[in-house]
Amino acid sequence: MKREHTDSNGAMIKKGSRAGRMAKGKELHGICGALRQAVARSVREYRTMKLISQKRLALDLGVAESTVSQWETGNRFPAAENFEALAQCLGIPPCRFFCIGRARCPVPCGNGF
């Protein structure tokens, strides 16, 4: 389905125009922001559930404590190589960071996921 973009007054924005690219960028930024916040909530939730401090998690992962803090506030997104190690430290499958409704998630959490 093709998305139509409009300006703040409801006028159509020409495809390929600078305004069109900016509207698409805002839409993508919104999706990325929501994903970043979902991951941030998950990291904090599972870390606190396991009673692991930010400092301990940072040491286990070989990153700075401020990096873990930034992941949890959504100011920074974990690098791809950190997701698997992060999941192992927290005892969850990596996909669990992206689950929207945990009650409906088909992947069981447990040790050795």
Image (tube, helix red, strand yellow):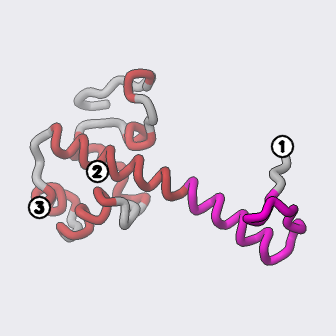
- Which of labels 1 and 2 is toward the front? 1
The foreground one among 65 and 60 is 65
At label 2, the amino acid type is Leu
Q: Which residue is outermost to the bottom?
A: 18
The foreground one among 19 and 65 is 19
* Residue where numbered disc 2 is placed: 86
* Residue where numbered disc 3 is placed: 55
Which comes before the other along the chain, label 2 or label 3?
3
Which region of the structure is painted magenta? 5-31
At label 3, the amino acid type is Lys
Contact? badges 1 and 2 (CB < 8 Å): no
Which comes before the other along the chain, label 3 or label 1?
1
Task: Tell me the SS state at disc 3.
Answer: helix
* Residue where numbered disc 1 is placed: 1
Q: Quadrant of residue 23?
A: bottom right
Q: Quadrant of residue 66?
A: bottom left
Give coordinates of residue 76: x percent, y percent: 37, 66
- Which of labels 3 and 1 is toward the front? 1
- Which of labels 2 and 3 is toward the front? 3
The foreground one among 91 and 2 is 2
Give coordinates of residue 100: x percent, y percent: 45, 35
Give coordinates of residue 29: x percent, y percent: 58, 62
Q: Residue at the spot x=28%, y=50% of the render? A: 86
Few, some or many residues within 10 Å of mark 3 (<14, 14–19, 20+): some
Give coordinates of residue 54: x percent, y percent: 15, 57
Task: Tell me the SS state at disc 2.
Answer: helix
Q: In this view, does 66 lie to the left or right of 35?
A: left
Q: How far apart are marks 1 and 2 (CA)?
A: 36 Å
Q: Residue at the spot x=32%, y=31% of the render? A: 113
